[in-house]
Amino acid sequence: MMKIVKIALSSAALLFAVGITAQAQAADGAELYMTKTCWSCHGKDANTPIMPIYPKLAGQNADYAFNQMKDIKSGARSNGQTAAMKGVMGLVSEEEMRAIADWLSTL
């Protein structure tokens, strides 16, 4: 019986830690979105871009958003408005891109 209690408590602690990590990552993504100036074109809510040709990012699939940012940074994508994004993406690491993309997908 004691072994079952230990396993249950260990499982609960692990789930709690995972939850805190997910919340921290979301907070980091939100903070990065602001500090890396994404908001200046895509809107503070990521849903009201300053120009109609700029995409709404709120609710975007995390993997899609991450891959778009990576492709813009590497030059693999160079169409549309990517010239404006290229300079900004040079200041964002892949880890930061992932955090931003993950956060955007939660909106």
Image (cartoon, helix red, strand yellow):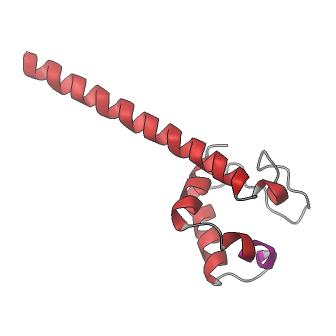
| Residue 74 position in % (x across, y down) | 61, 81
Looking at the rendering, the stretch of residues picked out in magenta corresponds to 82-86
Quarter assignment of residue 89: bottom right
Residue at 72% over, 51% down: 34
| Residue 13 position in % (x across, y down) | 30, 28
Residue placed farthest to the top in the image? 1
Magenta-highlighted stretch: main secondary structure? helix
The front one of 23 and 11 is 23
Q: Is residue 99 above or below residue 24?
A: below
The front one of 58 and 96 is 96
The front one of 30 and 103 is 30
Report whether 52 appears left or right of 87.
Answer: right
Residue at 76% over, 50% down: 46
The N terminus lies in which quarter of the figure?
top left
Residue at 58% over, 47% down: 28
The C terminus lies in which quarter of the figure?
top right
